Amino acid sequence: MEILINALIFIVSVLALAKGSSFFVDAAVKIARWFNIPPLVIGLTVVAFGTSAPEFGVTLLSAAQGLPDISVGNIIGSNIFNLGFILGGTALVRSINTDNKLVYRDGAFLLGGTVLLTLLIWDLSIGPIGGAILFSLLIIYIIFLLFQKEKKAAEEVPEKKEKVRWIDLLLFFVGLAMIIGGAHFLVEASTKIARIIGLSDFVIAVTIVAFGTSAPELATSIAASVKGHHGISAGNLIGSDIFNIFGVLGLTAMMNDLTVESGAHSNLLVLIGMVLLVIFFMRTQWKISRWEGLILIVIGLLRWFYSFYPGG
């Protein structure tokens, strides 16, 4: 009976995420255009921060409760899930256009952050100093994005601005609330189901919890891709992974010493490989095609199933 109740909560949460992401993407694009901010930058900052809120809540709460494996595993698993299942799945719906900023600026920053995290946590622990380094780099990155004086591409900022109405601001926050609330209950239900069937904390973190906290990115990116907002779609995923590493894990490590099991090594190496592959795909013909999306999904599936085996 408990499994059925949690399964129902799971389904309702997914529906809330789907509708909330639609509201959120539409409002974010209108606000971006009103302030002459390219949708790519909005995707890398506001949208990415909003959809990373579930990761922040779960990671910080897990660390406070003395569950560092869930804290770190959730971030690593979510980033792998974002680049494998979500980016790949979004590309299957519609090929994702990219540009040199997304590849050489944002992709390179994500790769550098992933390598840095691997070095900081290779001894299976990360503390306040490592967390401060990561979080400081995030602040520098955001300031760089907001004050960058680049010539905006014609497709990013239209000549005629669309007026922002009060209803757009309302829908922005309503959508964000539905995303965060839906993700919260989805994680709660998923974790309870996982524990009932006997999965370990680490496996739960890199699979079920990672899926739950990545659900906002999934809903938001697919909604943005269907609506043709490629900057939001791709930028949201790259930005979310950046926020997860530098912001969520960085801030959590500043507050709590985090230790993890040796399984983090293989997951981090897989994540580095995924980032490199995504950058390569984004650079080829400046888009992620459907077949490249399929490759990312297959890799994500293989990593998912491998996590259920000892030492995975």
Image (spheres, rainbow, N blue to C red):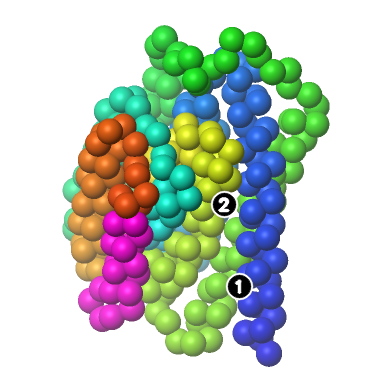
In the visual, does 22 lie left or right of 206?
right
In the visual, does 93 lie left or right of 136?
right
Give the residues in magenta. 294-312
Q: Which amino acid does label 2 sit on?
A: Ala
Vertical placement of residue 220 versus 63, above or below: above
Vertical placement of residue 124 versus 29, above or below: below
Residue occupying the point 48% across, 50% down: 93
User: Can you see residue 59?
Assistant: yes
Q: Where is residue 300 in the image (x, y as percent from the top left)?
A: 33, 62
In the visual, does 227 lie left or right of 112?
right
In the rendering, which numbered label is found on residue 219? 2
- Tell me which secondary structure the magenta stretch mostly adopts: helix
Q: Is mark 1 on a helix, strand or loop?
A: helix
Q: Which image quarter is the N terminus in? A: bottom right
Vertical placement of residue 114 versus 141, above or below: below
Residue occupying the point 37% across, 25% down: 140
Q: Which amino acid does label 1 sit on?
A: Ala
Residue occupying the point 53% across, 74% down: 191
Q: How crowded is mark 1: few (under 14 residues within 10 Å), some or many (20 or more)?
A: many
Q: Position of residue 306 (x, y in %)?
A: 28, 74
Residue occupying the point 73% across, 22% down: 164
Residue 250 falls in image quadrant: top left
Residue to which mark 1 is pinned = 189
In the rendering, which numbered label is found on residue 133? none
Sequence-first tag of 2 and 1: 1
Along the line of sight, which residue is nearer the eye, 230 or 177?
230
Q: Does the magenta stretch include residue 124?
A: no
Residue 128 falls in image quadrant: top left
Q: Residues within 10 Å of mark 2 (few under 14, many from 20)?
A: many
User: Can you see residue 55?
Assistant: no
Q: Is mark 2 on a helix, strand or loop?
A: helix
Q: Position of residue 259 (x, y in %)?
A: 31, 62
